[in-house]
Image (tube, grey):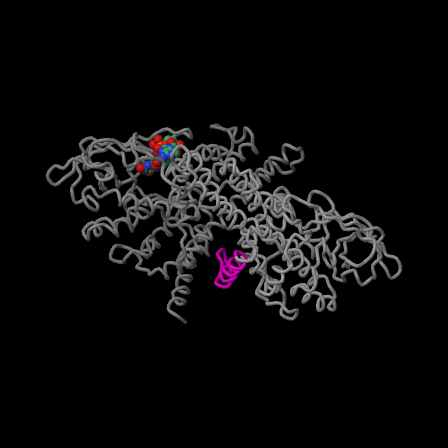
Amino acid sequence: MTDIEQFRLQTREWLEANCPTSMRTPMPIDEMVWGGRNLSFVSEDQRLWFERMRDKGWFVPDWPVGYGGGGLDPQRLAVLESEMRRLRCRPPQINLGIWMLGPVLLEFGTEEQKRELLPPMARGEIRWCQGFSEPNAGSDLASLQTSAREDGDAFIINGTKIWTSYGNMSDWMYALVRTGPKEPKHAGISLIVLDMNSAGVNVEPIDLISGKSSFCQVFFDDVRVPKRQLIGELNGGWPLAKALLQHERRAMSKFSEISLPTHFDLLEYLRRYLPDASSPGEIALQQRAVSCLMEEHAFRLTHRRINETMRARQDASGLMAISKLVHSEQERDKFEVLLDVMGQRALGWSGDGFSERELALTNTWLNSFAQTIAGGSSEVQLNVIAKRVLGLPEAK
Amino acid sequence: MGLIYNEEQQQLQDSAREFLAARSPVAEQRRLRDEAVPEGFSLGIWKEMLELGWGGIAAPEQYGGLEFGFQGFGPVFEEIGRHLSSAPLLSSVVLSASLLESMGSEQQREKLIPELINGQRRLALALDEDCRFRPERVGLKARKDGDYYVLDGKKTWVVDGFGADGWLTVARLEDESLAIFLVDATVERVQVDHLNLVDSRNHAALTFDEVRLPAEAKLPGKDALLALETVLDRGTACLAAELLGMSESLFERTVDYLKTRVQFGVPIGSFQALQHRAARLYVDLQLARSAVLAAFECLNDPEASATERSSLVSLAKWKAGEMAHRVSNEAVQMHGGIGVTDELDVGLYLKRIRVVQVQLGDSDYHCERYAATLR
Ligand SMILES: Cc1cc2nc3c(=O)[nH]c(=O)nc-3n(C[C@H](O)[C@H](O)[C@H](O)COP(=O)(O)OP(=O)(O)OC[C@H]3O[C@@H](n4cnc5c(N)ncnc54)[C@H](O)[C@@H]3O)c2cc1C
């Protein structure tokens, strides 16, 4: 038996013994475990699964053991991932730090920063949020204005970040700040990390069309951040931000894979609310719904194709570029159809007149609007496809 | 195979592309049309294709095939689409040889399959009777009369039916079940009319006026409808691959035009309104490619169930059809005035795409069929 087959067998055995059966079911959004100082679990199984994977270093199976990872090579990582898929194991925790900042730190951080920041991240002790967007810097991120002024061994931060997901529940933030006000706009940006408990940080959750949310505006009022918390070079933040956003796209596409099927399965709703379509209008609606399902099917296959393309070491960049756009638009389209299938039952806002699932559906539908904006709007995705994939010329 | 071509498929694609670019480019399609060649293809090029082994891609070795597996047709039909090439590969090999393989007697298989894959004989499938594809709605009657069968009725849209050596004809027996008859082109009382569609290919209408056939003309296999479904799935997947190839070529031409055509002092491809539309076509092309490859993967898998097969094949034809429709409409629009001229090849693609879109079932048909697999 080769080493790798041996590893597969051991991994399979370990997962079978250590992943509680209730952690092998599709994961509802509200049962995701986020690491951090305010860690909490909805069940004992969830806690066990979290702790066991943590102790193996398998929150980050491919990071070096010295930084709290599992030390697996790419081959073994692939084995672990495929065995977890086989058993349908839920991800034991979700953490932006691990997905986005971690890989950037591994590549660009100093040894001291890695030793300080990576192990708590790898153990799920610190929850991270992303402070990039500002009220006047969204799609055009590089026009950000939050300032970091040098003062002895620290930076003094002033300004505001907006749309910070889970800003009110996070422990640390990685943020883009302007350190070179006189430099050209891309050349005056730095990447820093800061503790959300620092004096002068204020976090205000924003009410969305879906209701209360954990998307926040964060205000900085003379916040002192030690200079050793600068990642990479002074004014060298832009390339790091781009690398980070690439990890974000990869993580998002992986995330959409593990969180599928969503708990609003169009087919199931079709069977329940439109069981025997008979009038021409109902039949047309049913066909529209089936078209939606077919588009989703084609997207799932495309996901598989991305994986196979990468495994074959062929270029998957074009396919990766369409992934976020297609997924977020298909979700939105699906809810539009669900609304038509369910009529007013999908429009309940609150109260006993509606089941919990119906209310959750309204909420998720309204949230689906955010998905075509967050993480690079659909229009920005189309720009990327047009320019980078198709090579169409820049506008003059 | 998976959702990307393996090495052998890649080689097949490369060699098909090289061959077709040299021997059957779009200009050849234009020549066939302008000279009104009634067969709609060139016999010489068809022979060359068969010499390359395309006829034997899926056929068992015992009948002279290569047993490469059905997956080999994916890249070949993609390239056929890309070059807008015409050949009776679908009608005579993918449909007819497959149908004989599942329904013919041992004697018929041993004699006819080798002849079909080496081109000595050419057969066409006579199934459609209506303008909308419904393979189970067969009205052509076959009445038993002593040792003979008598066929009476009409067939239409018989692909490559004109000039064929015979037609595998689907008929309804007196007990209402379906049967398939091998009707030799030499029998009397069959009238063949050429139907000239926008793609200038070979489509025929057949009229059977009390046609007497010997009993052995009826293929002896059981359950003709079931056999037909499998064979039609194969044909449908090939058409989806052809749509993909045509659309990809058309899309590449259009993107090139966006980069080179200058208006208002800039290439028109720098206008965001056009960029976004082009980007959306790219998205559709990718989704369609995934679906088409999944259909071929499934057809190649002996373990796949009939439900899986019809679900994936219908998904492929539906998605490829919807995508090709959009790509062809946009290709014309983005070329401006020159886009509606006969001089440009874009129109030839548009017209062929429309025909392939409806052949063996349009989007509505395949959406309905996919829906049936969800029950
Ligand atoms: C739910 C949610 C969570 C988020 N989480 C975070 C987070 O955790 N951290 C963080 O830093 N940010 C986060 N964001 C912010 C997100 O990245 C921005 O909202 C996004 O980049 C768009 O910026 P904007 O909202 O300022 O819109 P704008 O950029 O002002 O866009 C307005 C409209 O103009 C269009 N547009 C803009 N530029 C172009 C162009 N060049 N071509 C064509 N159309 C264009 C857009 O597509 C959009 O339709 C989140 C946003 C949402 C909605």
Q: Nearer the viewer, residue A23 or B247?
A: B247
Q: Main secondary structure of the magenta part?
A: helix
Q: Ligand 1: give its quadrant.
A: top left
| Residue A126 x %, y % | 27, 45
Residue located at (36% from left, 58% from top): A77
Taking the image as drawn, is residue B308 in sight? Answer: no
Q: Nearer the viewer, residue A133 or A94?
A: A133
| Residue A63 x %, y % | 29, 56
Q: As displayed, is residue B71 above or below residue A120? A: below
| Residue A247 x %, y % | 33, 47
Does residue B9 show up magenta in the picture? yes
Left of B235 or right of it: where is A81? left
Residue located at (37% from left, 28% from top): A207
Left of B76 or right of it: where is A81? left
Location of residue A337 by image quarter = top right
Q: Which residues are magenta?
A: B1-21
| Residue A159 x %, y % | 23, 31
Quadrant housing the C terminus of chain A? top left
Residue at the extreme right: B146
Q: Nearer the viewer, residue B354 or B264?
A: B264
Quadrant housing the N terminus of chain A? bottom left
Left of A368 or right of it: where is A344? right
Q: As displayed, is residue A132 above or below residue B4? A: above
Residue located at (47% from left, 36% from top): A332
Location of residue A313 by image quarter = bottom left
Residue at the extreme front: B35
Left of A148 or right of it: where is B257? right
